[in-house]
Structure formats: C-alpha cells, structure tokens
Image (cartoon, rainbow, N blue to C red):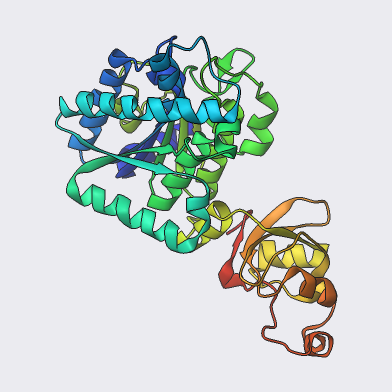
Amino acid sequence: MPGTAIRQHIAANCRRMVVKVGTNVICDEKGSPDHAAIGNLAAQIAGAIKSGVSVALVSSGAIGSGVGELGLSGRPKTLPQLQAAAAVGQGRLMQTFHDVFARHGVKVAQVLLTRDDFEDRARYLNIRNTLAALDEFGAMPIVNENDTVAVEEIRFGENDVLAALVATMLGAELLVLLTAVDGVMKDGQVLDVIEDVDEQAMALVREDRTALGSGGMGSKLTAAAMVTRAGEVAVIANAAAPNVLQRLLAGEKLGTVFVPAKRRLSSRRRWIGQAARPAGKIIVDDGAAKALLTGGKSLLPSGITAVAGRFARGDTVAILDSAGREIARGLTNYTAAEIDRIKGLKTSDIAKELGEKPYDEVVHRNNMSVKATD
C-alpha cells in the first residue's frame, strides 16, 4: 500500500490518536521543561481535539525535568539517583502541562504506569476503563512510566513501547512518535513509507542517544511494529515541523508512515500478543508452524519439539518455529513441566502420560495471537 493511500486513510478515519514526545522534544538542553515547545504542542493537540479527534499524550521528560530542577550537570548514572530525579521532575513537568494546556481550554490528567500494569489482565482492563472515563470527562490523559519505581523502563527507555501499548489498548487509529529527526533515514533521505519494519528499517538503526533521553530509533521502530501488527497506523515525524499534527491528520506527506496489517487484532489478542510478556517458550516443528500461521489451528502436543522456561497453566508463552522465530503468543493450558512430558505425543496419549487430560490443546486458537496473519 503506497504512503499516499495510508495518509488519505488517516485523514478520513482517524478518530483517536496517541502522541508520544520524548525528553529532547519538550525539555531544553538543561533538562527544564521548554514552555515554547510544550505550548506549540498544546496548541496543536487542542486543535485536534476541537476537530473531533480524541488524543492521549505519552510523555517522557520526568528525569530530564528533575535534572534541571536539581541543577545536575547531566543524567544520573545510578538507579536510585534516576528515580529521585524522576520524583522531583514529574511534578514540575505536570504543572507545566497543566498550565500550558489550560490556556487552550484542555484539562489534563496524570497517569503513571509500569510495564507490569499491562501484564495482569484485570489491571489492563482497569487502565483502559480509566482512560475511557477520562475521555468522557473531556480530560486528556498524559501518560508516563512511573520512573520512581520502575527499573527496566528507566534503563532501556521504553516510553515508545508504552505509547504503542496505550495505542493498541485504546484501539487508536494513529500513533504519532514525535522526535528530533524527520523520520526514518536511508542514504540521507527520509523514507516515506515502510511496509515491513523488520525487513526494511531495523538494519538502518544506529544506536544514537540524546544526552538526557534514553530512547532511540530502535525503540520507535519496535513501537511502530507493535501498532501496525495490531492493524493501526504509526508515523515517525519531526516535532519541530510546523503544525505537524494538523498536517498528518490532513493526510499530508510528512515523516515516515508505517503500513498496518490488513487485519485488525481484537482487544483480547492485542493483550495476549503484545501487552503480556511471555513467561517461557514453546518450540514447534514446521508442520505445526504452518498450521498456526496459515490454518488458524490450535497448538497440539504432537507438534511441539521443545519447551524453555518455567511457567504455570494460564501464563503467556511465546511460540517459536524451528528456526527460533517467534510466530505467536498464547495462554498455555499446561505447565512447562507438563508440556515437556507430553511434547510430540498425540492428544489421546496425554492422559496416559499425565494421569489426566484437562485439554486436548496446549494453546487454544481462541487464546492465541499469531504474528504473521492474526
């Protein structure tokens, strides 16, 4: 699908949008909130809301703001110092957002999350319900990772992934990742459209990092892949481009647009396939892989060749083909130890091996999200 068609699709169909901004977009070189940059962003978001588009903002910058508030010379190195800087900076950042957005008549709400909040199905649904209630009240959620308690998120800068999780949770038609570059670059030129993130884009990534931020193009491409696999559109664009959000919503050629999968995943499959991280792995033979990818089948023990990790019944597991590629994720009906005992067996032999057969399927198709075709 050409970029023009996708952009026209955005203009015609976008009713909900998630916008992600990084530290380098909303903070100055010292780490303090950049009022001019935030004011420009607020004006654009307010315009989108007035046009009927529901917006959720995912913002980094708590640690950067804390660095500026505390007068530090740079981003702290130790985890306690990072968490302390985030604790100081988050309040200042939200105060700035509140004051700036209020000038445009937009109410804002702070939502602090960690990756663990997405792991539990009940908590995941509670977050979604809260965000829906905020939308009903006309308050725009400003989402950030809870850096004062999170560990992995601070070390790896996963707010791009958080934005993707929020976008897929809400069923947003568009994720906009605003950054300091014009898009994904190749040979000095911005790529207009990317149809396959893994094939086209990942090889182009450089491990660039800003002084205060923690993300990079790699995490943005990961986020774009998550959103497009769910059947939605993602765009990476330059936050400094004049009226970037309005122009994207109007279908203008700007930034790099990512082609969505033809089939939109259901809410449940989005959670299984993206929000819930795998507790272990199940490796299958070529026949089973084909049945899952093209036949929409459940995973039976006969197609399993190996199992890795420790997990219980009901946990999320990654399903890998014989080459080690992840082809699906699902909720397992058996523990890792049980699967190791019944792998390669026919379903009729499960009871003989385990003394019981609660299920024919190791992973039922209704509890599975297949990456390539689902």
Q: Nearer the viewer, residue 323 or 128?
A: 128
x%, y% of residue 156? Answer: 60, 32
Q: Is residue 315 above or below residue 171?
A: below
**Camera-side residue: 60 or 228?**
60
Q: Please tell me which residue is depicted at 44% across the width and 29% down the height of the picture.
A: 86
Horizontal and vertical percent for residue 147? 48, 35
Residue 227, compared with residue 86, is above or below; it is below
Looking at the image, residue 234 sits to the left or right of residue 105; the answer is: right
On screen, 238 above or below 175? above
- Residue at the image position 52 percent from the left and 27 percent from the top: 82
Image coordinates of residue 179 in percent, x first then y, are 46, 22
* Image quadrant in which the C terminus is located: bottom right
Relative to residue 28, is residue 48 depicted above or below?
below
- Residue 300 position, x and y percent, is 74, 75
Q: Residue at x 84, y 76 (%)?
A: 341
Left or right placement of residue 334 versus residue 244 in this view? right
Regarding residue 1, the answer to whether it shows in the image is no
| Quarter location, residue 154 | top right
The tally of labels here is 0
Q: Left or right? Give the position of 365 relative to 163.
A: right
